[in-house]
Image (cartoon, rainbow, N blue to C red):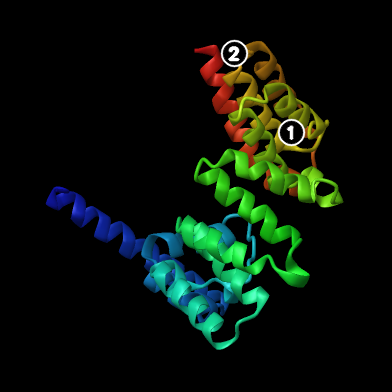
Amino acid sequence: MMPSFLNLNYYYVSFALQGFCLFHSFKRGTQQKWMWIIVFLPYIGSLIYLYTEVWGNRRINTSAIDVKGIINPGSKLKKLEDELKFTDTFNNRIKLADAYLDAGLTDKAIDLYKASLTGAFAENEHALAQLMQAYYTQGRYAEVLPIARQIYKIPQFARSKAHIVYAMALEQVGQIDAAEAEFKGMKGRYAYFEQRYQYGLFLIRQDRIEDAEQLFTDMLEEQPHLSAVEKKSNRQWFAKAKEELKKVYQ
């Protein structure tokens, strides 16, 4: 159990954060947008406010934040389930399937994707890519491969997360050379940072530590030459590459 003085500190820090954010928001005239987020999400809401409105004054569309869904994730699923019961459309089925997948309800997601991939939507790229991810999550790697081949020639596939899943599934079923060929196909300077990070992990799993080290180093050397938007969108992959290099040098 947390000591009482830590509970007290937590209360005061939370209260101080909320107070500062509410006061700052009131002064800026944005309290209508932010009040409920700050009040109902004491730490998370305050940190979101500080990041977007104070640190660098980065604005986000707060009307798009589903406060109720953050507080109670089950409410989002219930809402989507009700929408599907009321209007059984392909889009509503896929929205619910995506939510199931995000919530870890993979069996339900798979059933819904498979039921939706019929008729005019039998080759829907998004649903097929999500079904690939669901199968991979369950370790059903062999079932990923034929789906990937259905959408392989679609232009968007080359840079998609589905392509990464395909390469990793090939590795898992023992097709190492084929997996590396796919990873190499996603490799390029000043781009494909998620793909290259995953390729680096693949190389580590193959005990090719020096190759992985060079790949991660190349990524980090390219970072200063990117635009601010590119740096922001890929910062997690740079951070992960740094973590892997630290492990190599230990």
160 relative position to 246: left or right? right
Residue drawn at x 60%, y 67% as measured from the top left: 115
Q: Quadrant of residue 39?
A: bottom left
Which sits earlier in the primary sequence, circle 2 or circle 1?
A: 2
14 relative position to 228: left or right? left
Check contact, mark 2 vs mark 1: CB within 8 A: no
Q: Which residue is mark 1?
A: 223
Q: Which residue lies most toward the bottom here?
A: 86
- In percent of width and height, residue 54 lies at 56, 60
The circle drawn on residue 210 is: none
Residue 25 lies, with reference to residue 14, above or below; the image says: below
Camera-side residue of 249 and 135 = 135
Three-letter amino acid code of the residue under disc 2? Asp
CA neighbours of label 2 inside 10 A, class few (<14), some (14 to 19), many (20+) = few
Camera-side residue of 135 and 206 = 135
Q: Quadrant of residue 130?
A: bottom right
Residue drawn at x 61%, y 17% as measured from the top left: 206
Q: Which residue is mark 2?
A: 207
Q: Is residue 23 visible?
A: no
SS label for mark 1: helix
Residue drawn at x 44%, y 76% as measured from the top left: 78
Residue 75 lies, with reference to residue 110, above or below; the image says: below
CA neighbours of label 1 inside 10 A, class few (<14), some (14 to 19), many (20+) = some
89 relative position to 70: left or right? right
